[in-house]
Amino acid sequence: MPNCFLNVSRRLTAKWGGVKRSIDFDKLRQLLSSDIVEGNEERYQFTWPDKRKAILAANAPINATLRPCLEESVDFDTTQNLYIEGDNLDVLKCLKETYLHKVKMIYIDPPYNTGNDFVYEDDFAESASEYLANSGQFDEQGNRLVTNTESNGRFHTDWLNMIYPRLKVARDLLTEDGVIFISIDDNEVENLKKVCNEIFGEQNFVGNIIWQSRTSISNDDEISTNHNHTIIFSNNREKLSFGGDDIDESDYSNPDNDPRGPWKLVPIDANHVGGDTNYPIRNPKTGVDYYPPNGRIWCYNKSTLDSLMKDNRIKFGLTDDSSPKRKLFLNERKAKGDFKTPSSILLDAGTTKTGTTEIMALFDNQKVFDYPKPTSLLTRLMQYGYVNNNDIVLDFFSGSGTTAHAFWKYEIIKEISAKFILVQLPEDLDKSLLSASTDAKKNIRNAIDLLDKIGKPHLLTEIAKERIRRAGAKIKAENPEKAQHLDTGFRVLKLDSSNMKDVFYSPKETSQLELFKYVDNVKDDRTSEDLLFQVMLELGATLDSKIEESEVDGKTIFNVGDGYLVACFDQKVTDEVVTSIAKMQPTYAVLRDTSLADDATATNFEQIFKTYAPNTTTKIL
């Protein structure tokens, strides 16, 4: 039997102990038949091993929270920017409800699947336990460290299983007019486009920008790869608000003192698609007749062209000796928008060398990151994404922190006030040394040395946060007037397991004897601030909300978002404290189950709120 009939699968199982061979009878029958064989209807689809599990991973619930870290933050009390440490899939799930349809622009620069290690902790990524045992490595936090070489047989599969659920969750965060930009190289660009077609819809594909990432020629392949792709998808193409490149006013002048102002000449010929306007246009000064170029026609019929000539809108070049063109006035161009349509090829947005130079200027001329994106590329993409006042920019593969650096530059250029959310896994730099290339090792060691000097752990997030701190200070120093009110702070939040003990989520699974052991639902190592940020997420208060503290009867009361949420997590809360909270008439009031001082206070609790705040929703942790 020909080999094409054999569907060979290598399943090393205890039952077979070797290769199991099976025949695809549908294909065999079709090959031997001259007619179409009935069976499963064939249709175009994009799939890979474990795709169903990747879909489930996007929807699987989690018991996780985001804990604030005040000591690592900058301007914690006033900033609207967020820096979140943790696996981005879980972080996105934590953000999903509160930030549903609130993010204007997402930019990510995910792992390019070049054969180097990438880190994730999705336990579905391998379908065979033998494969996990043989090739999986875990760090102390349980993160998977996978050397994704092309020889492992799952080169594309592992990458797809990593990216799919993250994009699936991320789409729900985009506003109706929002857009996502994804940087990628040639290894996965085809797969990424297909994944995005499925998640965002083919109709929402905006384009693929080719960015010249370097200018030098390398002998690494038959063709020197000097570009990256940026795949762009909208959430809803019909409602997309998209920017473009700045209008260069130097292209416009007014040599004939036209009262309508500066102008430039634009062609009046078009592709020959229907119609026939292939007539001669005579230059009245020279008597020369002009026809459209071969294969093209004039944009206007003769009647319209005559009207344009009478209105002094047709010129035969600046010196009246070339083919006719139309005047495009600057004020007319601006009336159509502040931007001109961008090109799909970016040759003037900086290179990775530019990005390296920017970071070295912050770190005493030391290289600490490999091939960072330049801020000029990110500011250009933010302009295309039409980021404006109060918009949110999200980057959940934030790496070196370029997005934050570029974001502040963009705010100054556009004179706006927006906010960002950056997410990054705290990768261990010491372990990264084990698989890094020679050049990368040098940069990692530089980063480790710098972290030692400032007394920080050897984590990628630590060097990135330091970069962001220094970038903010540098921008303010270089722009003392424009940056007076620039928010260069960021709240640091860290992904962790839920603040609540297991019994809180599954009391039915806990014996009565065990229940008596739990005096409090809250884990012993959690603070009032931890609990506050958990309920902020649960009750829809954004994590950048203003938080004010006050004290009543020795107890701390948190007021979030000017009375949207009021909470107290101290013990032995009295009627006086409860009454004070109720009189604030918040939308939500939260206390913990062990807060109330005694049975009398617990009994009075409901009546106090009925009296002073009947519309307040109360919650007990």
Image (cartoon, rainbow, N blue to C red):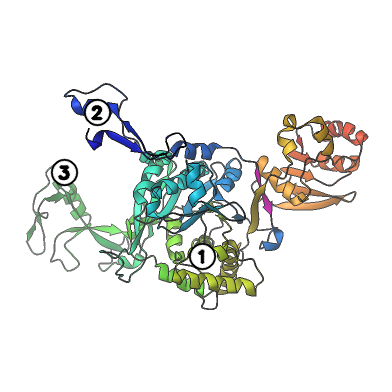
Residue 83 as seen in the image, left or right of residue 27: right
How crowded pointer 2 is (Cα within 10 Å; few <14, some 14-19, many 20+) is rated as few
Check the picture and name the quadrant holding the N terminus.
Answer: top left
Mark 3 and mark 2 in contact? Answer it, CB < 8 Å: no
Label 3 sits on what residue type? Answer: Val
Residue 429 is a magenta residue = no
Residue toward you, 110 or 324: 110
Q: Secondary structure at mark 3?
A: loop
Which comes before the other along the chain, label 3 or label 1?
Answer: 3
Mark 2 and mark 1 in contact? Answer it, CB < 8 Å: no
The stretch of residues the image draws in magenta is 63-68
Which comes before the other along the chain, label 3 or label 2?
Answer: 2
Tag 3 residue:
273
Label 1 sits on what residue type? Answer: Leu
Q: Position of residue 280 (x, y in %)?
A: 8, 53
Residue occupying the far top of the picture? 38
Check the picture and name the quadrant holding the C terminus.
Answer: top right
Q: Which mark is residue 434?
A: 1
- Measured in 3D between alpha carbons, the distance from the residue under mark 2 to the one under mark 1, in whole angstroms, is 49 Å
Q: Secondary structure at mark 1?
A: helix
Q: Is residue 236 above or below residue 478?
A: above
Q: Which mark is residue 28?
A: 2
Residue toward you, 385 or 299: 385
Residue drawn 25% across and 64% down? 222
Residue toward you, 168 or 554: 168
Label 2 sits on what residue type? Answer: Leu
